[in-house]
Image: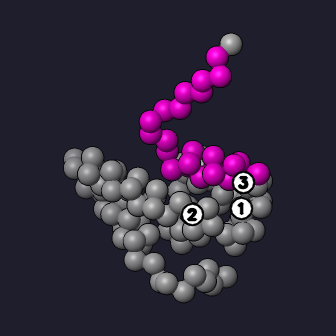
Amino acid sequence: MSDICYFPFTLTLGAKVRLSRVARRWRQIDLANEALVTQADVSALERGKYVCPLVEKRILESLGLVGDAITHYQKLVATLLRSPKRRREFEKRLTYLQKGDGSGSTGK
């Protein structure tokens, strides 16, 4: 049997969150506690469901994935030329992730 493992070239943002969490041997509740969000928020993000931008940013910052998310949203914005409503939503999230407050505080 081969030891080679194949992964898709593109992972969803939720899959990246899950892989990063599992690599740290964290449960969803551990990540939620670290990010000051609920376990349901972590679960929703991992499943690709809607979470508010602040919650998403807290989770991504806890895992060091903000850069990956920015790249992810840049690609989505570039490909959604025919769907202006969805494109605007992703542009808003991209802007929110890029601006950063510099305080490092989550404020909860």
Crowd rating for badge 1 (residues with CA inside 10 Å; few <14, some 14–19, many 20+): many
The type of residue carrying mark 3 is Arg
| Residue 102 in sight in this render | yes
> Which residue is pictured at 27% across the width and 46% down the height?
79
- In the displayed structure, does residue 49 sit left or right of residue 76? right
Q: In the picture, which quadrant includes the N terminus?
A: top right
* Disc nearest the viewer among 1 and 3: 3
SS for dot 3:
loop
* Tag shown at residue 64: 2
> Which residue is pictured at 72% across the width and 69% down the height?
34
* Disc nearest the viewer among 1 and 2: 2
Observer-nearest residue: 105 or 85?
Answer: 105
Kindly indicate the quadrant of the structure image that contains residue 28.
bottom right
User: Does label 1 or label 3 sit earlier along the sequence?
Assistant: 3
Q: Which residue is mark 1?
A: 31
SS for dot 1:
helix
Q: In the picture, which quadrant includes the C terminus?
A: bottom right
Crowd rating for badge 2 (residues with CA inside 10 Å; few <14, some 14–19, many 20+): few
**In this rendering, is residue 76 above or below 3?**
below
